[in-house]
Image: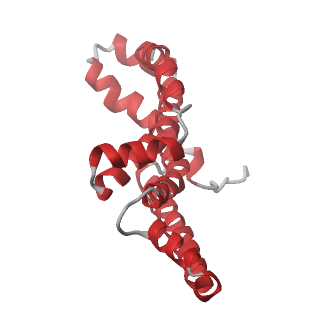
Amino acid sequence: MSGAIWLERTLSPYVVSSQMVPVIGLAPIVYGIIHNAEWARIVMAAYVTFFPIIIHTLKGLKSAAPEHLELMRSCGASLTARYIKCLLPSALPGLFSGMKIAAPLAVTSSIVVELMGAPDGLGVLMVSSLYYGHAQVGMFWATIMLSIGIGLISYLVISLAERWLTPGSLSSGPKEVMPHE
């Protein structure tokens, strides 16, 4: 657990300050440097999604029960065993919470990169449909609905993975409580 606190104290100022750069300003710079629309989308999606995922994962690492870690230490468990058997399972709910927040952000950041000069994609289709005015209003709304659908599907896939990989966590849904007899 002290490793998670050390990691958080070390990385937090850099992670927080990196998020102060507006995506709308960074996207054309990344696209101009990389000159590849696919890689620019990936880099911007990673940039935008890194913050919520790392913050929630660190919170999950810190939520490991100290008595469990102490028991593992007293039994002579290695650092690797403590991470695999105690810290990682306690970090998974936080990791999935961060991923569920980050999934729609990744879609939005990819569209912003496409608006900045990519040759194809939903952002390009949105701009071109707006260029033609009322004749392409249906196409504009179709791209909006498609981007919403992509965000929702990615959120649902992450939610299903969370239910499958963390069946006992509180965030995986309501639990059935057995009444006392």
Could you say where residue 53 lies in the image, as x and y percent from the top left? 48, 39
Q: Is residue 57 above or below residue 69?
A: below
The residue under the point 53% across, 56% down is 104
Percent x, y of residue 99: 48, 48
Looking at the picture, tell me which residue is in the foreground, 175 or 116.
116
Question: Which one is in front, 19 or 158?
Answer: 19
Q: Position of residue 82 (x, y in %)?
A: 34, 23
Residue at the bottom extreme, as displayed: 135
Q: Nearer the viewer, residue 3 or 18?
A: 18
Relative depth, front residue between 145 and 31: 31
Tell me: residue 9, above or below residue 113.
above
Q: Which residue is located at x 30 percent, y 43 percent?
A: 33
Residue 49 shows in this picture: no
In percent of the image, x 52 and y 39: which residue is there? 52
Q: Which quarter of the rendered picture does the N terminus lie within?
A: top left
Q: Is residue 52 visible?
A: yes
Q: What's the coloring here? A: secondary structure
